[in-house]
Image: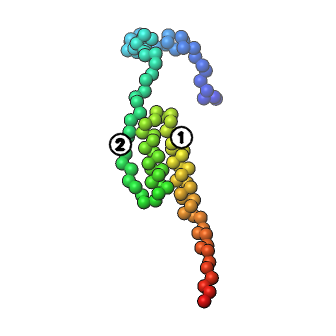
Amino acid sequence: MSDVMPETAPDAVAETVPDTVRETIPETDPAAVPETYHPAAPAPLGVERVPTGHPSVDAGLERLADADHLPADGHLEVYEDVHRGLREALAALDARPQPSPSYENRS
């Protein structure tokens, strides 16, 4: 036996709804719905950024402040930029130190 329910036309469904229930469902007046959506203006979140003492990480934290003044669709670019910088900072910690130049001690 299949669990798939047959599709029912919307009019057929409406006919099965009792009048008492139908009266409690508000009808949407198209004139009452605004035509355009105006999101809130960008605003800082007020998150305190505490310096870490590592210059590249601190630069990334400061870069996050740029997102405070952008609409939400602009945040992704800032976040990706900061993420890339943090990954580079972590990769630099794993890099082997380069040998220091040797100087011959001639007496």
Of residues 28 and 12, the one nearer the viewer is 28
Which quadrant: the C terminus?
bottom right
Q: Amino acid at mark 1?
A: Glu
Q: Position of residue 75 (x, y in %)?
A: 49, 38
Q: Does residue 45 appear to the left or right of 104 in the view shown?
A: left
Above or below for 69 versus 5:
below
Q: Does residue 104 appear to the left or right of 32 in the view shown?
A: right
Residue shown at the point (64%, 29%) measured from the top left: 1
Please, what secondary structure does the residue beneath circle 2 have? Answer: loop
Q: Amino acid at mark 2?
A: Gly
Q: Position of residue 32 (x, y in %)?
A: 40, 12
Q: Which residue is mark 1?
A: 77
Of residues 87 and 53, the one nearer the viewer is 53
Q: Which residue is mark 2?
A: 46
Residue shown at the point (53%, 49%) measured from the top left: 83
Residue shown at the point (60%, 29%) measured from the top left: 3
Residue shown at the point (60%, 85%) measured from the top left: 105
Q: Is residue 27 visible?
A: no
Q: Tell me how the rendering is colored.
A: rainbow
Alpha carbons under labels 2 and 1: distance apart: 20 Å
Q: Position of residue 73 (x, y in %)?
A: 51, 34
Please tell me how crowded label 1 is: few (under 14), some (14-19), or many (20+) other residues with Cα within 10 Å: few
Please tell me how crowded label 2 is: few (under 14), some (14-19), or many (20+) other residues with Cα within 10 Å: few
